[in-house]
Amino acid sequence: MPERELGALAAAAAGGDRDALTQLIRLTQHDLVRFLAPLCGPGEAEDLAQETYLRAIRALPEFEARSSVRTWLFAIGRRVAADAVRKATRRPRIASLADWRTAADTAAEHDRFEEQHALGDLLAALAPERREAFVATQISGLSYAEAAQVCGCPVGTVRSRVARAREDLVAAMHGDGWHRSATG
């Protein structure tokens, strides 16, 4: 959906239009979850997206549209993910064996599971700043300027982080023996 229409929905939602808020969430949820998953893990992305929307709803009256709605949401999501990481490092959670088996059984049903898992591991191994810039630009499709707003740094820094993330990913792929087939 064009950014102008998302901006109009955000303005209407800020004015109390519940239908506009519902539509805004529906239209941005997939992109937000896709942005959050590599930052926190796919199992937490949905929960963190909900927290992001809660914070965004409280902040809607102050949204001045100086950036796109997606960029604004991703910036909030980035802070939510950082808060979750800080919280997790203070109090690690342990999954029960039953949860692990259910997750493994579900994941095994997906095509290309091994490749997706390997890519997830490679992204997780990146330095947080590099992963964030890489995900914002290469996976979520933000421009470098939008990613700079999300990451809270200059555009040149985002470009540098993405370039270094690419170098790190290539080195990790060669170092771990993970290679794409010539057909894939």
Image: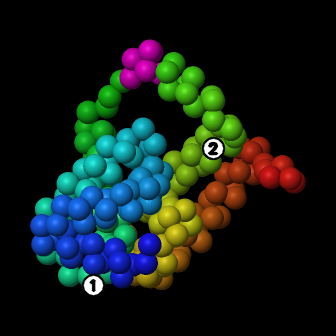
Between residues 90 and 7, which one lies in front from this camera angle? 7
Q: Earlier in the sequence, mark 1 or mark 2?
A: 1
Q: Residue at x 51, y 18 (%)?
A: 101
Q: Disc 2 designates what residue?
A: 116
Q: If the image is split into quadrants, where does the N terminus sit?
A: bottom left
Q: Residue at x 48, y 51 (%)?
A: 38
The residue furthest top is 98
How would you rate the neighbour count of disc 1 (Cα within 10 Å): few for under 14, some for 14-19, many for 20 or more?
Answer: few
| Residue type, numbered disc 1 | Arg
| Residue type, numbered disc 2 | Gln
Q: Measuring from the top left, give residue 129's x and y in whole percent.
A: 43, 62
Q: Magenta part of the protein: which range? A: 95-100
Q: Measuring from the top left, give residue 131's x and y in whole percent.
A: 49, 59
- What SS does tag 1 mark? loop
Q: Measuring from the top left, give residue 54's x and y in whole percent.
A: 20, 54
Q: Disc 1 designates what residue?
A: 66
Between residues 15 and 59, which one lies in front from this camera angle? 15
Task: Please indicate, yes or no, whether residue 123 appears anywhere in the rendered image.
Answer: yes
Q: CA distance from mark 1 to mark 2?
A: 36 Å
